[in-house]
Amino acid sequence: MFENLSDRLENAFKTLKGQGRITEINIASTVKEIRRALIDADVNYKIAKEFTDKIKEKALGEKVLTAVSPGQLMIKIVQDELTNLMGGQAAPFNIKGTPAVVLLAGLQGSGKTTFAAKLASYLKNKQGRQVMLVACDVYRPAAIEQLKVLGEQINVPVYEEEAQKDPVRIARNAIAQAKSDGKNCVIIDTAGRLAIDENMMNEIAAIKQTAKPNETLFVVDSMTGQDAVNTAKAFNDRLDFDGVVLTKLDGDTRGGAALTIKYVVNKPIKFASRGEKLDAIDLFYPDRMAQRILGMGDIVSLVEKAQENFDEKEAARLQKKIRKNQFDFNDFLTQISQIQKMGNVKDLMGMIPGLGKQIKDIDIDEHQFKKIEAVILSMTPEERLNPDLLNGSRRKRLSYGSGNTIQEVNQFIKQFEQMRKMMKQMNKMGSGRKALRGLGNMAGH
């Protein structure tokens, strides 16, 4: 996500390195490169020019402190302007009423149906809501079936009327059913089209008038770039929606839609969605996205994800076992499960400041987790509790049982033992400065 834009901006800042102060002359090439980077990211020329004119005006008006280089100052200015361009503050997603109603709109292929399920899972698991999904896409083949399959995966009911072809009536009946069933949130998945047409606009407007949603969200495929912004404007002129959802942010997107959609329609981006996993949904934070674009990582989001999957009792139990050097394969299996719950490993590593650029060309094969799990699950209960039991013949049996080569089994066990030794050493170091000094020594070797 935004890799090309990040690289181009980094190159633009390099022209200011080594400069003692900012002048109109040495800033000109930097601003020019930033503008080119934005246009290459499918940002409208007028918006790119206005953006870089603001940067130039701010940069020339700033006094560079002794402790701050011109390059660092420019990065800060660009970060602030990127944040403002994408909305400044995170927009609230407030849904009230019994039931609260969320209406999704957008073109076909934008990811509405998948997002509907993601939002249902989010509201159910993080806000404790009783959610009902509503299938109002009566045109696309298998659309209703897709929503039903997704609903089953997250254990959320789907309201559908297979014989009914009037989505307005379906929406009205669904809300009545939700009230009867005690559901306090309804998410309406509507039909998309391959292009904007009058019939589509009339239909979605009629559904909105009938359903009276608390939140109307326009779902847009971020990979379509500036076309997505133009489509959003057409929908907003007719629907006056409340916010935008950017989908497919894990794809090969240049970023134009994310950067400029707020500027064009003056409606906030409320959610960001990536991948097909039904927990891959995040509230959109403009400041955090600006940091990621500039290669600064997103440590706040990483900590939040860790906290969501953090079990305090489990952590205390694990710490006690590490102190006694009793960390075993059962514990390791638990840790793998917690990491997987946090999301895509490469995305998580990309949130660590300075690491995103280093790993962008590295292919992190998450299938390796499955191979490791297969080895552990092939062990007897005694072997999982006591790794020292794994002699040659037992390892050979694990190889057959897990479908891995004996070399792969040996490598995994070796890595596991190295990790146990490191934990033991860390435990002996104690805490505070002594622990930090020990970590430094380990890193040095």
Image (cartoon, rainbow, N blue to C red):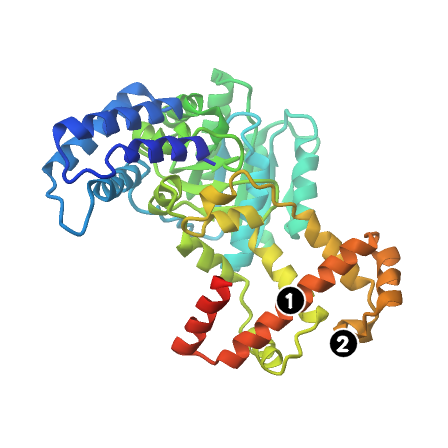
Q: Is residue 183 visible?
A: no
Left or right side of 413 for 254: left
Disc number lying in front (1 or 2)? 1
The furthest residue to the bottom: 324
Identify the residue shown where x is 20% and y is 41%.
Answer: 70
110 w.r.t. 424: above or below: above
Identify the residue shown where x is 24% and y is 23%.
Answer: 49
Q: x, y percentage for residue 329?
A: 72, 69
Three-letter residue code for mark 1: Gln
Q: x, y percentage for residue 214?
A: 42, 44
Mark 1 lies on a secondary structure that is helix
279 w.r.t. 373: above or below: above
Q: Between 193 and 289, which is closer to the camera in this rendering?
A: 289
Separation of residues labelled 1 and 2 (CA atoms): 15 Å
Quick one: label 1, few (<14), some, or many (20+) residues within 10 Å? few
Q: x, y percentage for residue 332?
A: 67, 66
Pointer 1 residue: 418
Q: x, y percentage for residue 169?
A: 57, 33
Three-letter residue code for mark 2: Asn
Identify the residue shown where x is 43% and y is 21%.
Answer: 227
Pointer 2 residue: 386
Identify the residue shown where x is 83% and y is 62%.
Answer: 378
- Tell me the quarter of the picture where residue 235 sits: top left
Q: Between 137 and 210, which is closer to the camera in this rendering?
A: 137
Q: Between 138 and 152, which is closer to the camera in this rendering?
A: 152
Quick one: label 2, few (<14), some, or many (20+) residues within 10 Å? some
Q: Which mark is residue 410?
A: none
- Tell me the quarter of the picture where residue 275 sits: top right
Left or right side of 401 for 309: left
Mark 2 lies on a secondary structure that is loop
- Tell me the quarter of the picture where residue 72 sits: top left
Q: State yes or no: discs 1 and 2 in contact (Cβ < 8 Å).
A: no
